């Protein structure tokens, strides 16, 4: 899905990446560029690269896709000879969509420069920012990443090294965060004690160095071998001495990774906490077939993240799997839906039905989620227009009934179609013959090789961390005349 579909659906996360090569033989610009392409699915709003050449940090960041921001000329102008580099792709779940919120954020400090990349959301960001402002910090954007960056610089003055500053900062921040931080001598990865967001470690060939990435598919893109996941609460340091870690914050909270990493966010070829995402989605489809058996002629999925679950449903049910939709891969993220007519036709522009697959057939349709319901209704109507006799719509996630505070862009409850409605009432809106969701019990079993618990707050309203009483969006994303802070943001 891109923005024309995401106007009524979910938005991706962010992706972080860092690489350290003590030999200096890796072309860092090419490596990070390739890694960001691999992570592009996690954020299409902005991106950036930061490089460390002989201790001097510099880089480029802007709004747009990786291919839009890093043109041939921009890539040629980036410095060569770096032994370390970081990269980031962003979709904003908190903070305005402006260039100042793009990452990596590079800060120059009396204790040395650093580049900061962050995936997640802090639940106490607004409170921390207010405290920092009162002590003299001047903010240039509205993201919680900048809050983390200022805390790091303050704590660096109070600690003997940057890794201890990271550990001390973790005492103050609450919520979801996977961090990659680069200084003039070190590359550091850190993950919140609950492990909400994924973060893994890779090794370069011949012991040349290490890689940190949100997903293992980015390791594959740069030829690094998967080593392990960063433990929840762990701080991992890569430098000329090798790899070491600080475990002060490990085992201080239950490990509750966001279950939607398996359902939608992560790429199918990635491994999250030991489970292949493709296998998790197959399992979701199998569970759906067990929970919602139906007589039908063909099973199809909504591209892209519904396809694996559809295959799992077909395998479990014995109903043939078919390709029901062709996805137009050339509809750009900046496509403007200026009129109501354009909004209504957005699904037809993005997806086209293969009529021969569905005409005169009873169709099982699998998708990953229903948010507001409008996109699902349009997709179902496409199938009926193509001649489907019946459409049985099954969703590889439970109903969204609550917002997310930890990095997933699930809207306010009043916009969620499942809030306050019965299954029958939801189905009246989307127009399927039957509707079924995956149960919360089964969604917790999707990590078939994982040994952790899961955050399912968006389905149950039960969160591992108390939700915030105020958010950065409300406090700092208003126009100046409404903010009440008197600050130019």
Image (cartoon, helix red, strand yellow):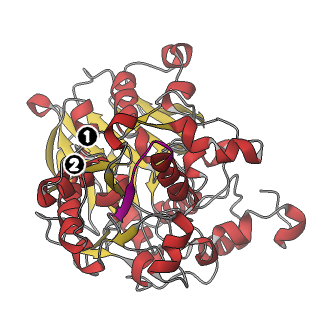
Q: Where is residue 372 in the image (x, y as percent from the top left)?
A: 57, 65
User: Mark 2: few, some, or many residues within 10 Å (few <14, many ≥20)?
Assistant: many
Q: Is residue 387 magenta?
A: yes
Residue 165 falls inside the magenta stretch: no
Q: Is residue 403 visible?
A: no
Left or right, 381 with respect to 214, comes to right
Per the rendered image, the range of residues in magenta is 385-395
The image shows residue 354, relative to residue 304, as above or below, that is: above
Regarding mark 1 in the picture, which secondary structure is present there? helix
Image coordinates for residue 483, horizontal then vertical, percent = 82, 69
Q: Is mark 2 on a helix, strand or loop?
A: strand
Of callouts 2 and 1, the N-terminal one: 2
Q: Are marks 2 and 1 in contact (CB under 8 Å)?
A: no
**Which residue appears at 18% of the width and 47% of the height?**
320
Front residue of 255 and 114: 255
Image quadrant assignment for residue 428 = bottom right
Q: Quadrant of residue 342?
A: top right
**Residue found at x 18% / y 35%:** 224
Vertical comparison of 255 with 395: above or below: below
Q: Name the residue under label 2.
A: 201
User: Which residue is more in the foreground, 389 or 91?
Assistant: 389
Is 299 displayed left or right of 459 in the figure?
A: left
Q: Residue at x 30, y 71 (%)?
A: 438
Say which residue label 1 marks.
Answer: 217
Which of discs 2 and 1 lies nearer the camera? The answer is 1
Q: Residue at x 72, y 73 (%)?
A: 134
């Amino acid at each position: 899905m891109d923005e024309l579909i995401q106007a009524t659906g979910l938005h991706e996360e962010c992706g972080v990446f860092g690489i350290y090569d003590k030999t200096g033989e890796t072309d860092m610009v090419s490596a990070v560029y390739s890694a960001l392409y691999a992570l592009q699915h996690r954020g299409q709003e902005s991106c950036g690269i930061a490089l460390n050449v002989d201790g001097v940090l510099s880089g480029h960041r802007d709004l747009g896709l990786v291919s839009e921001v890093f043109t041939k000329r921009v890539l040629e102008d980036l410095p060569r000879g770096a032994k370390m580099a970081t990269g980031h792709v962003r979709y904003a779940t908190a903070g305005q969509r402006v260039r100042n919120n793009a990452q990596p954020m590079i800060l120059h400090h009396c204790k040395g420069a650093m580049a900061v990349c962050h995936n997640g959301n802090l639940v106490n960001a607004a409170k921390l920012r207010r405290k920092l402002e009162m002590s003299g910090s001047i903010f240039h954007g509205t993201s919680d990443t900048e809050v983390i960056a200022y805390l790091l610089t303050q704590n660096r003055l109070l600690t003997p090294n940057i890794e201890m500053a990271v550990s001390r900062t973790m005492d103050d921040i609450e919520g979801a965060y996977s961090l990659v931080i680069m200084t003039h001598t070190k590359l550091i990865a850190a993950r919140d004690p609950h492990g909400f967001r994924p973060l893994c470690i890779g090794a370069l060939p011949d012991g040349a160095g290490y890689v940190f990435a949100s997903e293992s598919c980015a390791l594959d893109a740069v030829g690094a071998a998967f080593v392990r996941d960063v433990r929840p609460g762990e701080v991992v340091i890569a430098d000329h001495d090798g790899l070491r870690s600080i475990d002060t914050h490990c085992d201080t909270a239950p490990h509750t990774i966001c279950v939607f990493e398996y359902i939608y966010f992560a790429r199918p070829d990635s491994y999250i906490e030991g489970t292949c995402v493709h296998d998790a989605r197959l399992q979701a489809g199998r569970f759906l077939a067990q929970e919602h058996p139906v007589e039908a002629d063909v099973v199809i999925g909504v591209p892209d993240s519904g396809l694996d679950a559809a295959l799992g449903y077909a395998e479990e049910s014995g109903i043939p799997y078919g390709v029901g939709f062709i996805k137009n891969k050339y509809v750009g993220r900046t496509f403007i839906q200026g009129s109501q007519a354009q909004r209504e036709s957005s699904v037809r522009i993005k997806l086209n039905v293969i009529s021969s697959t569905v005409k005169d057939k009873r169709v099982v349709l699998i998708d990953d989620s229903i948010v507001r319901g409008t996109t699902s209704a349009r997709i179902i109507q496409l199938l009926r227009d193509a001649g489907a006799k019946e459409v049985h719509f099954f969703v590889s996630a439970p109903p969204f009934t609550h917002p997310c505070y930890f990095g997933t862009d699930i809207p306010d409850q009043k916009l969620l179609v499942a809030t306050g409605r019965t299954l029958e009432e939801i189905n009246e809106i989307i127009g399927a013959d039957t509707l079924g969701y995956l149960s919360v019990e089964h969604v917790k079993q999707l990590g078939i090789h994982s040994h952790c618990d899961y955050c399912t707050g968006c389905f149950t309203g039960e969160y591992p961390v108390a939700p915030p009483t105020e958010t950065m969006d409300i406090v700092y994303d208003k126009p100046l005349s409404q903010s009440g802070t008197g600050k130019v943001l």
